[in-house]
Image (cartoon, rainbow, N blue to C red):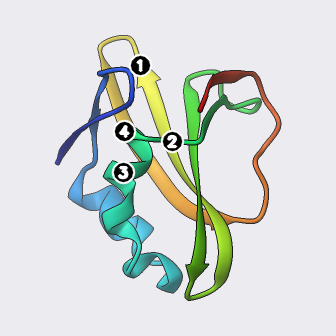
Amino acid sequence: MNLIDYSGNAIRLTDERLAHIKEHPEMIINTSKISEILTNPDIVVKSKSDEEARLYYKYYAGLSVGDKNMCVVVKFKQDDAFAITAYLTDSIKKGDVIWKK
């Protein structure tokens, strides 16, 4: 599946990565939000542990597990960008802010 982020970057989401994301029970019903998070994030942070990774966050109230941020992690290579994982979290990781709503 090919998705587009807020700045027009093409992001690949493979069936294998989608299956990995769905291994987390709370993510099964939330995978449809991945495209929305990429196109309309609240904040995008450059990962401190992986220079090629960007973390796209969007806050959701009233999820089955309560109010959470959903994070989609995207790896940017020279001619390729692809989603690695997505998860729910209470906090936004520290790192250089690339974009903020």
Instruction: Look at 47% across and 37% down and name the residue there.
Output: 74
Question: CA gap, disc 1 to disc 3?
Answer: 22 Å
| Mark whose residue sits in front, 1 or 2 | 2
- Real-space Cα separation, disc 1 to disc 2, in angstroms: 21 Å
Q: Nearer the viewer, residue 75 or 59?
A: 59
Disc number for residue 77 = 1
Which amino acid, mark 2?
Pro
Indicate which disc, 1 or 2, sits on the residue closer to the N terminus.
Answer: 2
Circle 2 residue: 41
Q: For the residue labelled by badge 4, is the local secondary structure a helix, a strand or a loop? A: helix
Q: Does dot 2 land on a helix, a strand or a loop?
A: loop
Q: Nearer the viewer, residue 16 or 56?
A: 56
Q: Mark 4 to mark 1: distance in Å?
A: 19 Å
The quarter of the picture where the C terminus appears is top right
Label pair 1/2, CB-CB below 8 angstroms: no
Figure check: 30 above or below 62: above
Secondary structure category for the residue under label 3: helix
> Which residue lies under the disc numbered 3?
36
